[in-house]
Protein backbone atom coordinates (compact mmCIF):
# COMPACT_ATOMS: atom_id res chain seq x y z
CA UNK A 1 0.00 0.00 0.00
CA UNK A 2 1.43 3.40 -0.94
CA UNK A 3 2.09 5.99 1.81
CA UNK A 4 -0.78 8.07 0.42
CA UNK A 5 -3.23 5.16 0.34
CA UNK A 6 -5.14 4.79 3.59
CA UNK A 7 -7.90 2.37 4.64
CA UNK A 8 -10.78 4.26 6.23
CA UNK A 9 -12.84 3.51 9.31
CA UNK A 10 -15.90 5.80 9.10
CA UNK A 11 -17.36 6.55 12.53
CA UNK A 12 -20.07 8.64 14.13
CA UNK A 13 -17.38 10.57 16.00
CA UNK A 14 -14.34 12.72 15.24
CA UNK A 15 -10.75 11.80 16.14
CA UNK A 16 -8.32 14.67 16.73
CA UNK A 17 -4.51 14.68 16.61
CA UNK A 18 -3.26 13.49 19.98
CA UNK A 19 -6.71 12.23 20.94
CA UNK A 20 -7.32 8.73 22.29
CA UNK A 21 -10.30 6.66 21.15
CA UNK A 22 -11.35 3.12 22.21
CA UNK A 23 -13.00 1.00 19.50
CA UNK A 24 -14.79 -2.37 19.45
CA UNK A 25 -13.98 -4.36 16.32
CA UNK A 26 -16.31 -7.10 15.07
CA UNK A 27 -16.97 -6.68 11.35
CA UNK A 28 -14.70 -8.90 9.21
CA UNK A 29 -13.52 -5.97 7.04
CA UNK A 30 -12.28 -4.10 10.13
CA UNK A 31 -10.78 -7.22 11.74
CA UNK A 32 -8.77 -7.62 8.51
CA UNK A 33 -7.86 -3.92 8.61
CA UNK A 34 -6.56 -4.16 12.20
CA UNK A 35 -4.60 -7.33 11.38
CA UNK A 36 -2.96 -5.65 8.37
CA UNK A 37 -2.17 -2.44 10.28
CA UNK A 38 -0.62 -4.48 13.11
CA UNK A 39 1.56 -6.48 10.75
CA UNK A 40 2.73 -3.43 8.81
CA UNK A 41 2.98 -1.03 11.76
CA UNK A 42 0.73 1.34 9.85
CA UNK A 43 -2.34 3.37 10.71
CA UNK A 44 -5.78 3.83 9.23
CA UNK A 45 -8.02 6.82 8.71
CA UNK A 46 -10.93 7.81 10.93
CA UNK A 47 -13.53 9.98 9.18
CA UNK A 48 -16.89 11.20 10.37
CA UNK A 49 -19.82 9.46 8.67
CA UNK A 50 -21.80 11.88 6.51
CA UNK A 51 -24.30 9.28 5.22
CA UNK A 52 -24.93 5.73 6.34
CA UNK A 53 -24.07 3.87 9.52
CA UNK A 54 -21.01 2.42 11.24
CA UNK A 55 -22.21 -1.14 10.60
CA UNK A 56 -23.29 -2.69 7.31
CA UNK A 57 -23.00 -1.10 3.88
CA UNK A 58 -20.01 1.22 3.31
CA UNK A 59 -20.80 4.68 4.68
CA UNK A 60 -20.02 8.01 3.04
CA UNK A 61 -17.07 9.51 4.96
CA UNK A 62 -16.18 13.17 5.42
CA UNK A 63 -13.41 14.39 3.13
CA UNK A 64 -11.16 15.35 6.02
CA UNK A 65 -10.09 12.91 8.73
CA UNK A 66 -7.36 11.94 11.14
CA UNK A 67 -4.90 9.06 10.98
CA UNK A 68 -5.37 6.54 13.81
CA UNK A 69 -2.39 4.63 15.23
CA UNK A 70 -3.10 1.55 17.36
CA UNK A 71 -1.63 1.93 20.85
CA UNK A 72 -3.36 -0.94 22.72
CA UNK A 73 -5.33 -4.16 22.25
CA UNK A 74 -7.80 -5.79 24.62
CA UNK A 75 -10.78 -8.13 24.74
CA UNK A 76 -14.05 -6.43 25.58
CA UNK A 77 -16.53 -7.79 28.15
CA UNK A 78 -18.59 -9.32 25.34
CA UNK A 79 -15.55 -11.15 23.91
CA UNK A 80 -14.90 -8.79 20.99
CA UNK A 81 -11.58 -7.30 19.98
CA UNK A 82 -11.01 -3.91 21.58
CA UNK A 83 -8.36 -1.48 20.42
CA UNK A 84 -7.29 1.94 21.55
CA UNK A 85 -6.03 4.36 18.91
CA UNK A 86 -4.29 7.70 19.09
CA UNK A 87 -4.90 10.44 16.53
CA UNK A 88 -1.88 11.42 14.42
CA UNK A 89 -1.83 13.39 11.14
CA UNK A 90 -4.82 15.00 9.45
CA UNK A 91 -5.54 14.14 5.84
CA UNK A 92 -7.82 15.13 2.97
CA UNK A 93 -9.48 12.35 0.97
CA UNK A 94 -8.81 12.79 -2.74
CA UNK A 95 -10.44 9.58 -4.07
CA UNK A 96 -12.04 6.48 -2.58
CA UNK A 97 -12.70 2.95 -3.73
CA UNK A 98 -14.57 0.15 -2.00
CA UNK A 99 -12.96 -3.27 -1.83
CA UNK A 100 -14.94 -6.48 -2.26
CA UNK A 101 -15.18 -6.89 1.54
CA UNK A 102 -16.73 -3.39 1.91
CA UNK A 103 -13.59 -1.69 3.23
CA UNK A 104 -13.16 1.87 1.94
CA UNK A 105 -9.63 2.72 0.84
CA UNK A 106 -8.69 6.31 0.04
CA UNK A 107 -5.95 8.17 -1.77
CA UNK A 108 -5.17 10.95 0.68
CA UNK A 109 -3.21 14.17 0.82
CA UNK A 110 -1.54 14.69 4.19
CA UNK A 111 -2.16 18.14 5.63
CA UNK A 112 0.67 20.30 6.93
CA UNK A 113 0.33 20.99 10.61
CA UNK A 114 0.82 24.41 12.11
CA UNK A 115 4.22 24.98 13.72
CA UNK A 116 4.21 24.90 17.54
CA UNK A 117 2.37 28.00 18.73
CA UNK A 118 2.28 29.41 22.25
CA UNK A 119 -1.09 30.17 23.75
CA UNK A 120 -1.85 33.88 23.52
CA UNK A 121 -3.15 35.90 26.51
CA UNK A 122 -6.55 36.28 24.82
CA UNK A 123 -7.03 32.48 25.08
CA UNK A 124 -5.54 31.79 28.55
CA UNK A 125 -9.03 31.24 29.93
CA UNK A 126 -9.25 28.12 27.76
CA UNK A 127 -6.09 26.65 29.32
CA UNK A 128 -7.53 27.27 32.78
CA UNK A 129 -10.80 25.61 31.79
CA UNK A 130 -9.00 22.57 30.37
CA UNK A 131 -6.88 22.22 33.52
CA UNK A 132 -10.04 22.25 35.64
CA UNK A 133 -11.71 19.64 33.43
CA UNK A 134 -8.66 17.39 33.71
CA UNK A 135 -8.38 17.90 37.48
CA UNK A 136 -12.02 16.81 37.85
CA UNK A 137 -11.51 13.83 35.55
CA UNK A 138 -8.66 12.55 37.72
CA UNK A 139 -6.00 10.07 36.67
CA UNK A 140 -4.36 10.01 34.15
CA UNK A 141 -5.51 13.49 33.05
CA UNK A 142 -4.40 15.20 36.24
CA UNK A 143 -0.79 14.11 35.58
CA UNK A 144 -0.29 16.04 32.32
CA UNK A 145 2.83 18.19 32.11
CA UNK A 146 2.08 21.85 32.80
CA UNK A 147 4.03 22.87 29.66
CA UNK A 148 1.26 21.32 27.52
CA UNK A 149 -1.10 24.04 28.73
CA UNK A 150 0.96 26.66 26.86
CA UNK A 151 0.57 24.86 23.49
CA UNK A 152 -2.23 26.48 21.47
CA UNK A 153 -2.70 23.51 19.14
CA UNK A 154 -2.88 20.95 21.95
CA UNK A 155 -5.33 23.09 23.99
CA UNK A 156 -7.62 23.46 20.98
CA UNK A 157 -7.66 19.75 20.15
CA UNK A 158 -8.29 18.69 23.75
CA UNK A 159 -11.12 21.18 24.29
CA UNK A 160 -12.70 20.13 20.99
CA UNK A 161 -12.86 16.62 22.51
CA UNK A 162 -14.01 17.58 25.99
CA UNK A 163 -16.55 20.37 25.46
CA UNK A 164 -20.16 19.35 24.74
CA UNK A 165 -20.04 20.19 21.04
CA UNK A 166 -22.16 18.74 18.27
CA UNK A 167 -20.32 16.25 16.08
CA UNK A 168 -20.62 18.70 13.15
CA UNK A 169 -18.80 21.34 15.22
CA UNK A 170 -16.06 18.84 16.05
CA UNK A 171 -15.68 18.12 12.33
CA UNK A 172 -15.51 21.85 11.62
CA UNK A 173 -12.74 22.26 14.21
CA UNK A 174 -10.80 19.33 12.72
CA UNK A 175 -10.90 21.17 9.38
CA UNK A 176 -9.60 24.47 10.82
CA UNK A 177 -5.87 24.82 10.08
CA UNK A 178 -5.04 27.69 12.43
CA UNK A 179 -4.72 26.93 16.16
CA UNK A 180 -5.69 30.54 16.95
CA UNK A 181 -8.84 30.33 14.82
CA UNK A 182 -9.78 27.06 16.54
CA UNK A 183 -9.30 28.64 19.98
CA UNK A 184 -11.25 31.75 18.98
CA UNK A 185 -14.18 29.59 17.89
CA UNK A 186 -14.10 27.76 21.23
CA UNK A 187 -13.86 30.89 23.36
CA UNK A 188 -16.84 32.39 21.54
CA UNK A 189 -18.83 29.21 22.30
CA UNK A 190 -18.08 29.22 26.05
CA UNK A 191 -21.12 31.32 27.09
CA UNK A 192 -23.36 28.64 25.56
CA UNK A 193 -22.06 26.09 28.09
CA UNK A 194 -22.84 28.20 31.20
CA UNK A 195 -25.74 26.94 33.31
CA UNK A 196 -28.72 29.27 33.25
Image: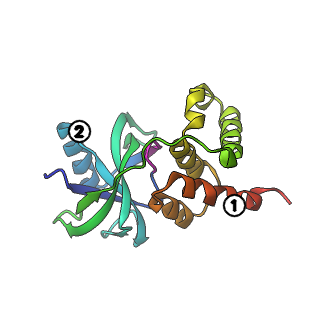
Which x, y percent locates residue 6? 23, 55
Q: Secondary structure at mark 2?
A: helix
What residue does disc 1 label?
188
Task: Decide whether residue 17 is among the magenta residues.
Answer: yes
Q: Residue at x 46, y 39 (%)?
A: 77
- Callout in the foreground (2, 1): 1
- State the mark number for residue 25: none
Residue 47 at least partly seen: yes
Q: Secondary structure at mark 1?
A: helix
Quadrant assignment for the C terminus: bottom right
- State the mark number for residue 38: 2
All told, the count of numbered labels is 2
Task: Decide whether residue 129 is among the magenta residues.
Answer: no
Which x, y percent locates residue 55? 37, 63
Which x, y percent locates residue 46? 37, 55
Furthest-left residue in view? 1
Judged left or right of residue 170, residue 175 is left
Q: Compared to 107, does 137 lie above or below? A: above
Q: Residue at x 71, y 35 (%)?
A: 136
Q: CA distance from mark 2 to mark 1?
A: 41 Å
Q: Which residues are magenta?
A: 16-22
Q: Residue at x 40, y 47 (%)?
A: 24
Judged left or right of residue 12, residue 43 is left
Colour option used: rainbow
Q: Compared to 93, does 157 lie above or below? A: above
Q: Which one is in front, 60 or 80?
A: 60
Label 1 Cα crowd, 10 Å radius (few <14 / some 14-19 / many 20+)? few
Judged left or right of residue 100, residue 185 is right
Amino acid sequence: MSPNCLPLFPLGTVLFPGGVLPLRIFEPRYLDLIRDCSRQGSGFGVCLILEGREVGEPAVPAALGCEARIIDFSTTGDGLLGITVEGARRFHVERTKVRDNGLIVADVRWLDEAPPTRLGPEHELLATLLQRLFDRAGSPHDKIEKSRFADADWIGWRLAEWLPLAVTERQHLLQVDSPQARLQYLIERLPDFQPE
